[in-house]
Image (cartoon, rainbow, N blue to C red):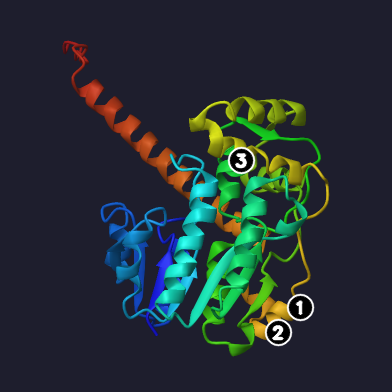
């Protein structure tokens, strides 16, 4: 089975590539830049140039491909809009996969996407799920809530650097999952026939609120946080302003996600059936506490090593300075 991974340079996509290669799959990656994706080639993946928003570039990527894992999504910094990438681009990809006779198509979506038609990314993900289900392809949809990796920049680093941690009041708790574990489910779906033409939630062991995560980071780092609350009305106003400018459309669409968090409803789902169908033991998966503990243990060790090297360099500099000093000890004359 030759596997095509789309969105392979992203936080999730690269973990899918790594997992598939480790399990012995021949992996091809659809990329927009060979330079940016060079690390994937070093891992052993084949690279092919293509762009979801340029449908004519897609057919060559499907030559000899039997399965697709689609982890593509628009970045907040992209010049293209969420609609262009996550809807028009995804439709083009699904159609190209259908024409190529692909046997399996794995798609990542968002938990409870159908419940928020006013949130652009959620609506688009739900519509893409429906389009994929009606395409005739053997598909599997994996619905997730949030990545543990995103918590490092959001909470851990600001606390370590004694910067403000921004929260929007009592937001909805989220069942975050490690992208390595999510990749495990995606690759496993290729081997389990019972996952075909079905949708599964794939989330962490339990939902975590913002203040719970902050307290965890404080405990693991030994430092106090500086929490600043961002009024929801201010975020809504920022979204409206961003919509006036084309360069702000992506940011505006992502700011709309705050409406989901503001409901206070936990973003989580029962996982018993998912574990059973995929044959995965929940004990094998990372917990948020374990993930953050590993991060802080590593970073605190590096900080101590850096401080030690700094002290050594300071001591050496002091010794060199003493050697160059013009004030030398003068011996007293003998009687």
Crowding around mark 1 (Cα neighbors within 10 Å: few <14, some 14 to 19, many 20+) is: few
Q: In the displayed structure, would residue 118 be above or below residue 146?
A: above
Element on which disc 1 rests? helix
Q: Quadrant of the C terminus?
A: top left
Residue bearing mark 1: 272
Q: CA distance from mark 3 to mark 1?
A: 33 Å
Pointer 3 local density, CA inside 10 Å: few below 14, some 14–19, many at least 20: many
**Viewer-proximal residue, 94 or 145?**
94
Q: Residue at x 57, y 49 (%)?
A: 150
**Residue drawn at x 31%, y 76% as measured from the top left:** 63
Q: Tell me: residue 102, above or below residue 293.
A: below
Image location of residue 74, percent across then percent down: 50, 49
Distance (Cα) linking label 2 and label 3:
36 Å
Q: Is 305 left or right of 119, judged from the image as shown?
A: left
**Dots 2 and 3: beta carbons under 8 Å?**
no
Callouts 1 and 2 close, C-beta under 8 Å: yes
Numbered mark located on residue 276 in the image: 2
Q: Dot 3: what SS?
A: helix
Verify CB contact (< 8 Å) between mark 3 and mark 1: no
Q: Quadrant of residue 124?
A: bottom right
What residue would you read off at disc 3? 253
Q: Position of residue 145 (x, y in %)?
A: 67, 58
What is the total number of numbered labels drawn onto the structure image?
3
* Mark 1 → mark 2, Cα distance in angstroms: 6 Å
Q: For residue 96, what is the image quadrant?
A: bottom left
- Indicate left or right for 16 with 196 as reference: left
In the rendered structure, which disc, 2 or 3, sits on the residue that comes first in sequence?
Answer: 3
């Amino acid at each position: 089975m030759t596997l095509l991974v789309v969105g392979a340079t992203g936080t999730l996509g690269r973990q899918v590539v790594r997992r598939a290669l480790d399990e012995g799959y021949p992996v091809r990656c659809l990329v927009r830049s060979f330079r940016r994706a060079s690390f994937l080639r070093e891992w052993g993946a084949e690279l092919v140039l293509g762009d979801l928003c340029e449908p004519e570039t897609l057919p060559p990527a499907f030559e000899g491909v039997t399965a697709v894992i689609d982890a593509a999504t628009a970045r907040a910094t992209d010049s293209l809009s969420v609609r262009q990438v996550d809807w028009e681009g995804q439709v083009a990809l699904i159609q190209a996969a259908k024409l190529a006779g692909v046997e399996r198509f794995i798609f990542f979506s968002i938990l409870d996407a159908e419940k928020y038609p006013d949130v652009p990314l959620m609506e688009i993900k739900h519509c893409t799920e429906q389009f994929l289900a009606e395409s005739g392809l053997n598909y599997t949809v994996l619905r997730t809530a949030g990545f543990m990796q995103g918590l490092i920049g959001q909470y851990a680093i600001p606390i370590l650097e004694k910067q403000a941690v921004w929260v929007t009041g009592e937001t909805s708790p989220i069942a975050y999952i490690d992208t390595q574990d999510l990749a495990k489910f995606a690759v496993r779906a290729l081997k389990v026939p019972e996952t075909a033409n079905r949708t599964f939630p794939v989330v962490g062991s339990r939902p975590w609120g913002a203040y719970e995560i902050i307290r965890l980071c404080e405990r693991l780092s030994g430092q106090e946080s500086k929490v600043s609350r961002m009024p929801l009305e201010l975020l809504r106003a920022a979204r409206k302003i961003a919509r006036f400018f084309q360069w702000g459309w992506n940011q505006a669409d992502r700011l709309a996600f705050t409406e989901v968090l503001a409901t206070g409803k936990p973003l989580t789902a029962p996982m018993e059936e998912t574990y059973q169908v995929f044959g995965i033991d929940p004990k094998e998966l990372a917990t948020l506490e374990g993930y953050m503990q590993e991060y802080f243990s590593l970073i605190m060790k590096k900080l101590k090593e850096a401080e030690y090297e700094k002290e050594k360099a300071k001591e050496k500099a002091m010794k060199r300075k003493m050697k160059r000093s013009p004030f030398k000890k003068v011996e007293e004359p003998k009687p």
